[in-house]
Amino acid sequence: MKTRRQGLGSLAVRFAGLIFGAALVALPWRGAEAQIGSARYSAIVIEARTGSVLIDAGADEPRFPASLTKMMTLYMVFEALRDGRTQLGSRIVMSEEAASRPPSKLGIPPGGGLTVEQAILALVTKSANDVAAAVGEHLAGSEERFAQMMTMRARSLGMTQTRFRNASGLPDWEQVTTARDMATLGRRLFTDFPNRYHYFGTVHFAWGRAQIRNHNRMLGDYDGADGIKTGFINASGFNIVTSAQRDGVRLVGATFGGSSWVERDRHMGALLDQGFSRMGVAPRAPSSVMAAASPAPRRNAPAARPVAQGNTRAAQVAPQQRPRPQQQVAAAPNRQNAAPVAFRQTPAAPPPRPAARPAQRVEQGSAGSNPQRANTPRPDTQRQQTANAAPRPAQR
Protein backbone atom coordinates (compact mmCIF):
# COMPACT_ATOMS: atom_id res chain seq x y z
CA MET A 1 0.00 0.00 0.00
CA LYS A 2 2.82 2.36 0.92
CA THR A 3 4.56 1.63 -2.37
CA ARG A 4 1.33 2.27 -4.26
CA ARG A 5 0.83 5.61 -2.49
CA GLN A 6 4.38 6.59 -3.31
CA GLY A 7 3.74 5.67 -6.92
CA LEU A 8 0.56 7.75 -7.02
CA GLY A 9 2.40 10.65 -5.42
CA SER A 10 5.16 10.40 -8.01
CA LEU A 11 2.59 10.40 -10.81
CA ALA A 12 0.91 13.45 -9.32
CA VAL A 13 4.22 15.30 -9.19
CA ARG A 14 5.00 14.39 -12.79
CA PHE A 15 1.53 15.46 -13.92
CA ALA A 16 1.90 18.79 -12.13
CA GLY A 17 5.30 19.24 -13.76
CA LEU A 18 3.81 18.63 -17.18
CA ILE A 19 1.06 21.18 -16.53
CA PHE A 20 3.59 23.76 -15.32
CA GLY A 21 5.87 23.11 -18.29
CA ALA A 22 2.97 23.49 -20.69
CA ALA A 23 2.10 26.81 -19.07
CA LEU A 24 5.63 28.07 -19.56
CA VAL A 25 5.58 27.07 -23.21
CA ALA A 26 2.35 28.97 -23.65
CA LEU A 27 3.69 32.19 -22.16
CA PRO A 28 5.81 33.35 -25.11
CA TRP A 29 2.85 33.09 -27.46
CA ARG A 30 0.93 35.41 -25.19
CA GLY A 31 3.94 37.67 -25.06
CA ALA A 32 3.53 38.32 -28.79
CA GLU A 33 0.09 39.77 -28.18
CA ALA A 34 1.38 43.25 -27.46
CA GLN A 35 -0.77 46.04 -28.80
CA ILE A 36 -0.74 49.75 -29.30
CA GLY A 37 -1.47 51.27 -25.91
CA SER A 38 -0.24 48.24 -23.96
CA ALA A 39 2.50 48.21 -21.33
CA ARG A 40 5.15 47.55 -23.96
CA TYR A 41 4.01 50.37 -26.26
CA SER A 42 6.03 53.51 -26.86
CA ALA A 43 6.45 55.90 -29.77
CA ILE A 44 8.08 59.09 -30.94
CA VAL A 45 8.22 61.24 -34.07
CA ILE A 46 11.01 63.75 -34.63
CA GLU A 47 11.80 66.27 -37.35
CA ALA A 48 15.00 65.08 -39.01
CA ARG A 49 16.66 68.43 -39.73
CA THR A 50 16.58 69.80 -36.18
CA GLY A 51 15.78 66.71 -34.13
CA SER A 52 12.81 68.47 -32.53
CA VAL A 53 10.20 66.15 -31.03
CA LEU A 54 6.71 66.31 -32.52
CA ILE A 55 5.08 63.33 -30.77
CA ASP A 56 6.21 61.54 -27.63
CA ALA A 57 4.42 58.59 -26.03
CA GLY A 58 6.61 56.94 -23.40
CA ALA A 59 9.65 57.52 -25.60
CA ASP A 60 12.10 57.09 -22.71
CA GLU A 61 10.69 53.85 -21.33
CA PRO A 62 13.02 50.81 -21.64
CA ARG A 63 12.14 48.48 -24.49
CA PHE A 64 13.71 45.52 -26.30
CA PRO A 65 15.03 46.61 -29.72
CA ALA A 66 14.78 43.22 -31.48
CA SER A 67 16.14 43.57 -35.03
CA LEU A 68 16.21 47.35 -34.79
CA THR A 69 19.61 46.43 -33.34
CA LYS A 70 20.81 45.89 -36.90
CA MET A 71 20.50 49.63 -37.51
CA MET A 72 23.43 50.07 -35.13
CA THR A 73 25.26 47.16 -36.76
CA LEU A 74 24.88 48.91 -40.11
CA TYR A 75 26.00 52.23 -38.62
CA MET A 76 29.22 50.51 -37.58
CA VAL A 77 29.63 49.02 -41.07
CA PHE A 78 29.11 52.41 -42.74
CA GLU A 79 31.61 53.97 -40.37
CA ALA A 80 34.18 51.28 -41.16
CA LEU A 81 33.65 51.89 -44.89
CA ARG A 82 34.10 55.64 -44.41
CA ASP A 83 37.28 55.15 -42.40
CA GLY A 84 38.74 52.63 -44.88
CA ARG A 85 38.77 49.72 -42.41
CA THR A 86 36.80 47.59 -44.87
CA GLN A 87 35.53 47.78 -48.44
CA LEU A 88 32.22 46.93 -50.11
CA GLY A 89 33.96 44.08 -51.91
CA SER A 90 35.75 42.74 -48.81
CA ARG A 91 34.89 39.13 -48.00
CA ILE A 92 33.21 38.20 -44.72
CA VAL A 93 33.77 34.58 -43.71
CA MET A 94 30.95 32.78 -41.91
CA SER A 95 32.27 31.18 -38.74
CA GLU A 96 30.72 28.14 -37.10
CA GLU A 97 29.58 30.39 -34.24
CA ALA A 98 27.87 32.89 -36.54
CA ALA A 99 26.31 30.14 -38.64
CA SER A 100 24.66 28.71 -35.51
CA ARG A 101 22.37 31.74 -35.08
CA PRO A 102 18.67 30.95 -35.40
CA PRO A 103 16.49 32.41 -38.19
CA SER A 104 15.98 34.73 -39.80
CA LYS A 105 19.22 33.86 -41.62
CA LEU A 106 20.77 33.34 -45.02
CA GLY A 107 21.97 29.89 -43.97
CA ILE A 108 25.55 30.28 -45.19
CA PRO A 109 27.56 27.22 -44.03
CA PRO A 110 30.71 27.66 -41.91
CA GLY A 111 33.62 28.55 -44.15
CA GLY A 112 31.33 30.17 -46.70
CA GLY A 113 31.08 33.87 -47.07
CA LEU A 114 29.73 36.99 -48.71
CA THR A 115 30.89 40.50 -49.50
CA VAL A 116 30.36 43.47 -47.23
CA GLU A 117 27.82 44.92 -49.65
CA GLN A 118 25.91 41.63 -49.74
CA ALA A 119 25.95 41.66 -45.94
CA ILE A 120 24.47 45.17 -45.90
CA LEU A 121 21.64 44.09 -48.20
CA ALA A 122 21.04 40.89 -46.21
CA LEU A 123 20.72 42.89 -42.98
CA VAL A 124 18.39 45.48 -44.52
CA THR A 125 16.07 43.02 -46.30
CA LYS A 126 16.32 39.56 -44.76
CA SER A 127 17.40 40.81 -41.33
CA ALA A 128 19.77 37.85 -41.28
CA ASN A 129 21.02 36.99 -37.79
CA ASP A 130 23.90 34.83 -39.01
CA VAL A 131 25.14 37.68 -41.19
CA ALA A 132 24.90 40.17 -38.31
CA ALA A 133 27.08 37.94 -36.13
CA ALA A 134 29.57 37.46 -38.97
CA VAL A 135 29.76 41.22 -39.52
CA GLY A 136 30.55 41.70 -35.84
CA GLU A 137 33.35 39.15 -36.03
CA HIS A 138 34.65 40.75 -39.23
CA LEU A 139 34.90 44.23 -37.71
CA ALA A 140 35.83 43.44 -34.10
CA GLY A 141 37.13 39.86 -33.94
CA SER A 142 34.15 38.63 -31.90
CA GLU A 143 30.47 39.49 -31.67
CA GLU A 144 30.80 40.17 -27.96
CA ARG A 145 33.51 42.75 -28.51
CA PHE A 146 31.51 44.23 -31.38
CA ALA A 147 28.48 44.66 -29.10
CA GLN A 148 30.66 46.59 -26.65
CA MET A 149 31.80 48.83 -29.49
CA MET A 150 28.18 49.30 -30.56
CA THR A 151 27.22 50.42 -27.07
CA MET A 152 30.09 52.87 -26.79
CA ARG A 153 29.33 54.36 -30.20
CA ALA A 154 25.63 54.58 -29.35
CA ARG A 155 26.42 56.58 -26.21
CA SER A 156 28.52 59.00 -28.26
CA LEU A 157 25.51 59.54 -30.54
CA GLY A 158 23.35 60.51 -27.56
CA MET A 159 21.65 57.12 -27.17
CA THR A 160 22.09 57.20 -23.40
CA GLN A 161 19.55 54.49 -22.54
CA THR A 162 20.72 51.84 -25.03
CA ARG A 163 22.86 48.80 -24.28
CA PHE A 164 23.78 46.12 -26.83
CA ARG A 165 24.76 42.53 -26.12
CA ASN A 166 24.74 41.16 -29.68
CA ALA A 167 24.73 42.41 -33.26
CA SER A 168 21.43 40.89 -34.34
CA GLY A 169 18.79 41.71 -31.74
CA LEU A 170 18.25 38.10 -30.73
CA PRO A 171 16.63 38.01 -27.26
CA ASP A 172 18.78 39.13 -24.37
CA TRP A 173 17.28 40.65 -21.23
CA GLU A 174 20.23 43.04 -20.96
CA GLN A 175 19.85 44.39 -24.51
CA VAL A 176 17.58 47.40 -24.11
CA THR A 177 16.83 50.72 -25.76
CA THR A 178 14.12 53.38 -25.99
CA ALA A 179 11.98 54.77 -28.78
CA ARG A 180 13.87 58.06 -28.49
CA ASP A 181 17.24 56.37 -28.88
CA MET A 182 16.12 54.38 -31.91
CA ALA A 183 14.65 57.46 -33.60
CA THR A 184 17.94 59.25 -32.87
CA LEU A 185 19.83 56.41 -34.53
CA GLY A 186 17.53 56.49 -37.56
CA ARG A 187 18.13 60.22 -37.92
CA ARG A 188 21.90 59.85 -37.58
CA LEU A 189 22.02 57.11 -40.20
CA PHE A 190 20.45 59.57 -42.65
CA THR A 191 22.51 62.61 -41.69
CA ASP A 192 25.88 60.89 -41.11
CA PHE A 193 25.82 58.60 -44.15
CA PRO A 194 23.75 60.23 -46.91
CA ASN A 195 25.64 58.19 -49.51
CA ARG A 196 24.74 54.90 -47.78
CA TYR A 197 21.21 55.59 -46.63
CA HIS A 198 19.78 54.43 -49.98
CA TYR A 199 20.40 50.82 -48.91
CA PHE A 200 17.43 51.09 -46.52
CA GLY A 201 15.15 51.65 -49.50
CA THR A 202 16.09 48.32 -51.11
CA VAL A 203 12.90 46.41 -51.93
CA HIS A 204 14.46 43.17 -53.20
CA PHE A 205 17.85 41.54 -52.73
CA ALA A 206 19.12 38.86 -55.12
CA TRP A 207 20.82 35.99 -53.30
CA GLY A 208 21.70 33.16 -55.62
CA ARG A 209 18.51 32.29 -57.45
CA ALA A 210 16.33 33.75 -54.71
CA GLN A 211 14.80 37.20 -54.61
CA ILE A 212 14.58 38.27 -50.96
CA ARG A 213 11.94 40.88 -50.26
CA ASN A 214 12.48 43.60 -47.70
CA HIS A 215 10.46 42.97 -44.54
CA ASN A 216 9.66 46.68 -44.28
CA ARG A 217 6.19 46.95 -45.85
CA MET A 218 6.09 50.70 -45.23
CA LEU A 219 8.23 51.05 -48.35
CA GLY A 220 5.65 51.70 -51.03
CA ASP A 221 2.73 51.48 -48.59
CA TYR A 222 3.26 54.90 -47.03
CA ASP A 223 3.73 57.88 -49.33
CA GLY A 224 7.21 59.28 -48.81
CA ALA A 225 8.65 56.41 -46.73
CA ASP A 226 12.17 55.38 -47.79
CA GLY A 227 13.51 53.32 -44.79
CA ILE A 228 14.49 52.22 -42.14
CA LYS A 229 14.02 48.93 -40.21
CA THR A 230 11.53 46.59 -38.59
CA GLY A 231 11.92 44.29 -35.58
CA PHE A 232 10.13 41.62 -33.61
CA ILE A 233 10.67 39.33 -30.67
CA ASN A 234 8.03 38.08 -28.25
CA ALA A 235 9.25 40.36 -25.47
CA SER A 236 8.97 43.51 -27.58
CA GLY A 237 6.03 43.04 -29.90
CA PHE A 238 6.30 44.43 -33.42
CA ASN A 239 8.66 47.42 -33.67
CA ILE A 240 9.57 49.78 -36.47
CA VAL A 241 11.65 52.86 -37.21
CA THR A 242 10.48 54.71 -40.32
CA SER A 243 11.80 57.74 -42.13
CA ALA A 244 9.59 59.59 -44.62
CA GLN A 245 9.85 62.81 -46.57
CA ARG A 246 7.05 65.00 -47.94
CA ASP A 247 7.31 68.47 -49.46
CA GLY A 248 10.90 68.79 -48.30
CA VAL A 249 10.09 67.85 -44.70
CA ARG A 250 11.65 64.66 -43.35
CA LEU A 251 10.36 62.91 -40.24
CA VAL A 252 11.71 59.91 -38.35
CA GLY A 253 9.34 57.87 -36.23
CA ALA A 254 9.70 54.86 -33.93
CA THR A 255 6.96 52.61 -32.61
CA PHE A 256 7.28 49.68 -30.20
CA GLY A 257 4.72 47.09 -29.09
CA GLY A 258 2.40 46.35 -32.00
CA SER A 259 0.41 43.13 -31.92
CA SER A 260 0.97 42.55 -35.65
CA TRP A 261 2.90 44.14 -38.47
CA VAL A 262 -0.39 45.45 -39.87
CA GLU A 263 -1.30 47.25 -36.63
CA ARG A 264 2.25 48.51 -36.23
CA ASP A 265 2.46 49.90 -39.77
CA ARG A 266 -0.94 51.56 -39.67
CA HIS A 267 -0.13 53.15 -36.34
CA MET A 268 3.23 54.33 -37.64
CA GLY A 269 1.41 55.85 -40.61
CA ALA A 270 -1.02 57.63 -38.28
CA LEU A 271 1.87 59.01 -36.23
CA LEU A 272 3.67 60.30 -39.31
CA ASP A 273 0.45 61.84 -40.63
CA GLN A 274 0.09 63.77 -37.39
CA GLY A 275 3.72 64.81 -37.52
CA PHE A 276 3.46 66.11 -41.07
CA SER A 277 0.26 67.93 -40.17
CA ARG A 278 2.05 69.67 -37.30
CA MET A 279 4.77 70.70 -39.78
CA GLY A 280 2.17 72.20 -42.12
CA VAL A 281 2.46 69.52 -44.80
CA ALA A 282 -0.76 68.84 -46.71
CA PRO A 283 -2.24 65.37 -46.13
CA ARG A 284 -1.90 62.64 -48.77
CA ALA A 285 -4.31 59.93 -49.81
CA PRO A 286 -3.50 56.58 -48.12
CA SER A 287 -2.11 53.81 -50.27
CA SER A 288 -1.90 50.00 -50.32
CA VAL A 289 -2.11 48.45 -46.84
CA MET A 290 -2.71 51.88 -45.31
CA ALA A 291 -5.98 52.10 -47.22
CA ALA A 292 -6.98 48.47 -46.60
CA ALA A 293 -10.23 47.78 -44.80
CA SER A 294 -9.50 48.17 -41.13
CA PRO A 295 -10.42 45.53 -38.55
CA ALA A 296 -13.25 46.13 -36.14
CA PRO A 297 -12.29 48.79 -33.57
CA ARG A 298 -11.64 47.75 -29.99
CA ARG A 299 -14.46 47.83 -27.55
CA ASN A 300 -14.58 50.85 -25.27
CA ALA A 301 -11.87 52.62 -27.27
CA PRO A 302 -10.63 55.67 -25.35
CA ALA A 303 -11.84 59.03 -26.57
CA ALA A 304 -9.36 61.70 -27.52
CA ARG A 305 -9.36 65.23 -26.22
CA PRO A 306 -7.16 68.21 -27.08
CA VAL A 307 -4.51 69.12 -24.51
CA ALA A 308 -2.61 72.39 -24.52
CA GLN A 309 1.19 72.03 -24.56
CA GLY A 310 2.63 75.55 -24.44
CA ASN A 311 2.06 77.08 -27.87
CA THR A 312 1.15 73.74 -29.37
CA ARG A 313 -1.88 71.52 -29.10
CA ALA A 314 -1.91 67.76 -29.34
CA ALA A 315 -4.49 65.11 -28.70
CA GLN A 316 -4.27 63.03 -25.58
CA VAL A 317 -6.10 59.80 -24.90
CA ALA A 318 -8.51 60.08 -22.00
CA PRO A 319 -7.42 58.00 -18.98
CA GLN A 320 -8.68 54.45 -19.11
CA GLN A 321 -7.54 51.14 -17.76
CA ARG A 322 -5.28 49.51 -20.33
CA PRO A 323 -5.67 45.91 -21.41
CA ARG A 324 -3.25 43.41 -20.01
CA PRO A 325 -0.27 42.80 -22.33
CA GLN A 326 -1.22 39.11 -22.58
CA GLN A 327 -4.77 39.86 -23.65
CA GLN A 328 -5.31 39.60 -27.37
CA VAL A 329 -7.19 42.46 -28.92
CA ALA A 330 -8.21 43.53 -32.37
CA ALA A 331 -5.67 45.42 -34.46
CA ALA A 332 -5.73 49.19 -34.44
CA PRO A 333 -8.23 50.83 -36.81
CA ASN A 334 -7.18 52.34 -40.12
CA ARG A 335 -5.11 55.47 -39.64
CA GLN A 336 -7.77 57.55 -41.44
CA ASN A 337 -10.16 56.94 -38.55
CA ALA A 338 -7.63 56.45 -35.77
CA ALA A 339 -7.83 58.62 -32.69
CA PRO A 340 -4.94 61.09 -32.39
CA VAL A 341 -1.91 59.81 -30.59
CA ALA A 342 -1.14 60.74 -26.98
CA PHE A 343 1.43 63.47 -26.41
CA ARG A 344 3.88 62.78 -23.58
CA GLN A 345 1.87 59.75 -22.58
CA THR A 346 3.41 57.67 -19.83
CA PRO A 347 2.79 53.96 -20.41
CA ALA A 348 2.72 51.37 -17.69
CA ALA A 349 5.98 49.85 -16.55
CA PRO A 350 7.29 46.96 -18.64
CA PRO A 351 6.40 43.46 -17.49
CA PRO A 352 8.67 41.96 -14.80
CA ARG A 353 11.46 39.65 -15.79
CA PRO A 354 10.48 36.02 -15.42
CA ALA A 355 12.25 33.83 -12.91
CA ALA A 356 12.65 31.05 -15.44
CA ARG A 357 13.39 31.20 -19.12
CA PRO A 358 10.27 30.25 -21.05
CA ALA A 359 10.59 28.78 -24.49
CA GLN A 360 10.49 31.50 -27.17
CA ARG A 361 9.23 31.49 -30.68
CA VAL A 362 12.02 32.06 -33.17
CA GLU A 363 11.77 35.02 -35.48
CA GLN A 364 10.91 33.87 -38.97
CA GLY A 365 11.81 30.23 -38.96
CA SER A 366 11.94 27.13 -36.87
CA ALA A 367 12.85 27.16 -33.22
CA GLY A 368 16.47 27.36 -32.27
CA SER A 369 18.59 28.44 -29.38
CA ASN A 370 21.02 31.29 -29.15
CA PRO A 371 24.24 30.00 -27.57
CA GLN A 372 25.32 33.55 -26.81
CA ARG A 373 25.47 34.62 -23.19
CA ALA A 374 24.18 31.29 -21.96
CA ASN A 375 24.37 32.33 -18.34
CA THR A 376 22.02 35.28 -18.84
CA PRO A 377 18.32 34.59 -18.14
CA ARG A 378 16.51 35.47 -21.33
CA PRO A 379 14.27 34.01 -24.00
CA ASP A 380 16.03 31.27 -25.93
CA THR A 381 14.93 32.04 -29.45
CA GLN A 382 13.61 34.70 -31.70
CA ARG A 383 11.22 34.75 -34.62
CA GLN A 384 11.64 37.40 -37.27
CA GLN A 385 8.92 38.62 -39.55
CA THR A 386 8.40 36.55 -42.69
CA ALA A 387 8.37 38.25 -46.04
CA ASN A 388 5.06 37.11 -47.50
CA ALA A 389 2.97 35.98 -44.54
CA ALA A 390 0.16 38.01 -43.04
CA PRO A 391 -0.65 38.90 -40.36
CA ARG A 392 2.77 37.59 -39.24
CA PRO A 393 5.42 39.91 -40.62
CA ALA A 394 8.48 39.01 -42.52
CA GLN A 395 11.08 40.72 -40.60
CA ARG A 396 12.33 41.66 -38.65
Image (spheres, rainbow, N blue to C red):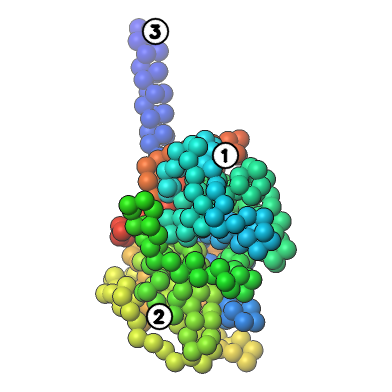
Judge from the rendering whether residue 258 lies leftward or rightward of residue 210; answer left or right: right
Circles 2 and 3: CB atoms closer than 8 Å: no
Q: What residue lies at 38% left-to-right and 63% top-to-bottom? A: 204
> Circle 1 sits on which residue?
372
Indicate the position of residue 16 as horizontal and vertical percent values: 39, 29
Q: In the displayed structure, would residue 222 be above or below residue 141?
A: below
The numbered dot on residue 223 is 2
**Which residue is disc 3 drawn over?**
2
Q: Which mark is residue 310?
A: none
Report the front residue among 296 and 208: 208
Q: Amino acid at mark 1?
A: Gln
For discs 2 and 3, the disc positioned in front in the rendered view:
2
- Residue 230 in the image, given as x and y percentages of width and height: 46, 62
Expressed as whole percent of the image width and height from the top left, the position of residue 84 reads 67, 59
Q: CA distance from mark 1 to mark 3?
A: 47 Å
Please give left or right for residue 145 compared with residue 74 in the image.
right
| Mark toward the start of the polypeptide (1 vs 3) | 3
Q: Secondary structure at mark 1?
A: loop
The number of discs equals: 3
In this rendering, would 65 be left or right of 385? right
Residue 141 in sight here: yes
Residue shown at 49%/36% (left/top)? 110
Q: Residues within 10 Å of mark 1 (few under 14, many from 20)?
A: some
In this rendering, does residue 261 appear at all? no
Secondary structure of the residue carrying numbered label 2? loop
Most distant residue in the front direction: 89
138 vs 75, nearest the viewer: 138
